[in-house]
Image (cartoon, rainbow, N blue to C red):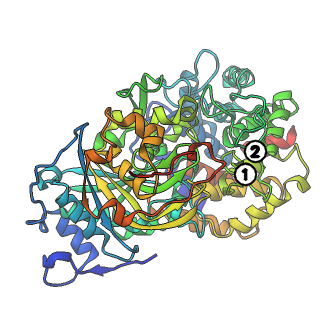
Amino acid sequence: MTRRNSQTMPGNLLDRQLTRREFLIRAATGAILAPMVFPNLAGCRRSLESADVFIGRMGSYDGDIASIIFRGLGELAVSPEEIRGKRILLKPNLVESHIGAGHINTHPLVVRGAAEAFLRCGASEVLVGDGPGHCMDTEMVLEESRLGDVLIEDQLRFVDLNYDDGYRVPNQGGFSRFRSLVLPRTLREVDLVVSLAKMKTHHWAGVTLSMKNLFGLFPGTYYGWPKNALHFEGIEKCILDINATVRPYFSIVDGIIGMEGDGPIMGNPHHAGVLVMGRNLPAVDATSARIMGIDPKKVPYLAKASGRLGPIQEASIRQRGETIRSVRTDFSLVEGIHAHKGLRWSPK
Amino acid sequence: MTPSQTLIEGLKKRMLPDGGFAFFNGGSYRTDATAWAIIGLRSAGEGENLIEPGLNRLAGDQMRDGRVVTSPDAPDAFWVTPLAVLAWHGSERHKENMNRAVEFLLSTSGKHWKKQKLDPVAHDTSIRGWSWTAGVHSWVAPTSYSLLALRAVGKIRHPRAEEAARMLMNRQLAAGGWNYGNTSVYGRQLYPQPDQTGVALSALSPYVTKGEVIRSLEYLGREIGRIRTPLSLGLGLLGLGAWGDRPPGFMNWVRECVDRQNRRGIYNTQERSLLLLAISGNPALIEETAKG
């Protein structure tokens, strides 16, 4: 993993190198703002009929991830007013950690890049939180994934959502039989939630992207390890319920190196070289799926989200940045896995 | 201060004026924090006067059928019950609470079904253990906690205890170790986890021979030297200790783990309590078991 102690700000905003700490402090206090990257496009916000999705090419984790995300925010017409002074929760996908299997989790440098981008936009605080579905020892996931080092270096606060105090809210989705959901208290303390997902195949759900990533918001002390009540109630229904209830502000999918085959744990790394982002999670996931060579209409929870939570039809999604066809790279699917059957995308 | 003193003082700061413990500094009362803190403090030899208010508050939160839950508005999240049994164990004044909790455990199990031929999961889904929450499958940690609780109250040979031991053995990974409770899915053997391996080994010691868990002990023995996170180190040391395999230099690791708070942040009540258990050799869980 690359560690950076200093960096040059993109776009010639600054005329000298700042240390990371200096940069973050100045960003947090509003000394660094982006005067020209929010073109105030008349884009669609949370429409069910259409949405904008940005695809940024990023060949490796050594690149300037913050700048790509920053550019994406601009292309997607995120205005500084939406972010300035806000407390933002970045919710990465942390599942398990194993030496040599870094492609299981959202890469720490994507977390860093996202934090920098939102701080650069004037966020008052960016914190990071997740409740891994398989690991009681979240601290070990942080340590072995090296995200813990990044959090310390960048002085980003982490909240272990598995052990957070819970509060009950009505289930706004109504897809499962759950009348209410228990969410971590931290959600009440932040203004905006950003799903910071990993681009992976999934042996129960077909794909795991920004919508499925929200399972990590359910506290383990209420749902267990694994969060088995969600499986019994129906993974697809619960994905829709948590999305309808939390309604994240934004999502970024780490597809620089994703996972193909028997995801979300045992699959193989697959280099897709992209970051995919947008305000509408079904649209972002549909675009990510197409990049993976997967037909989102064949992924049951995305098909059900269509028209209810957001658009997934290709014609309804305005692609910014790269085109899907220029970055498409088929993720391998496993013949014996039921959820993978018939997923391959064959555009007309 | 020694690591034990640091941990004890840290737990005392989480004591609440009206009894019970918080999970974090400045937090509010929680049943899981209270049970863990009592188990940890008792293992460190702290007096009952320190523990008694917590025992009482835990008793006040026990539901009519004996279960103890994460929160009153989450009656399904009953995985705290075996921890409450271990907390009440040894307190004459809470014997009735403990017995009701044990009865609840014996009347409850995870959801089980006859293994289907084409089931993508490899383990035997019919063997009963305990679940984290109501109406779902049994998993390694809640089954291990419940087995430890039954052992502590002398029900070491109860049919449910024997079945739970079989369930845990069925979930042991072929290459050694345990994870949360799936051995293999769609033909792929999953990864072991030190914390789950530790708690399963702690629970199983009277039920199987060392040869039957030797690969797991070897896996944990290899891993434990590099682990400095409190939950995995604490449970890992408990697991090895249950089999007489606690490494001689373990206190240095505990010290490093405790000191690590300066960099990583303050540990929660569960983590502090598990480290105290690991330091003490775990009388709350293992000595009682040995009597059984």
Q: Residues within 10 Å of mark 2 (few under 14, many from 20)?
A: many
Taking depth in this image into account, of B28 and A237 the one nearest to the observer is A237
Report whether mark 1 lies on the same chain as mark 2.
yes
Q: Chain of mark 2?
A: B
From mark 1 to mark 2, how far is it between C-alphas?
7 Å
Helix, strand or loop for disc 1:
loop
Residue mark closest to the camera, 1 vs 2:
1
Question: Quick check: marks 1 and 2 in contact, CB under 8 Å?
Answer: yes
- Extreme residue toward the front, this view: A348
Question: Taking A255 as reference, is B183 left or right?
Answer: right
Q: Residue at x 51, y 47 (%)?
A: A343
Query: Residue A149, percent across and down?
Result: 44, 69
- The answer to whether residue B38 is above or below residue A168 is below
Please identify the quarter of the rendering in which residue B214 is found.
Answer: bottom right
Q: Residue at x 59, y 66 (%)?
A: B255
Quickly name the residue at label 2: B122
Label 1 marks a residue whose chain is B
The quarter holding residue A339 reads: top right
Which numbered marker is on residue B187? Answer: 1
Residue lying furthest bottom: A16
- Image position of A272 (left or right of A88): right
Where is B24 relative to A326, above or below? above
Kind of residue at disc 1: Gly
* Image location (x, y in percent) of residue B56: 57, 26
Q: Identity of the amino acid at label 2?
A: Ala
Along the horizontal axis of the image, is A248 left or right of A98? left
In percent of the image, x 72 and y 70: which residue is there?
B249
Q: Is residue B80 left or right of residue B223?
A: left
Q: Local crowd at mark 1 within 10 Å, few (<14), some, or many (≥20)?
A: few
Labels 1 and 2: the sequence-earlier one: 2
Residue B24 appears in the picture as rendered = no
Q: Nearer the viewer, residue A89 or A241?
A: A241
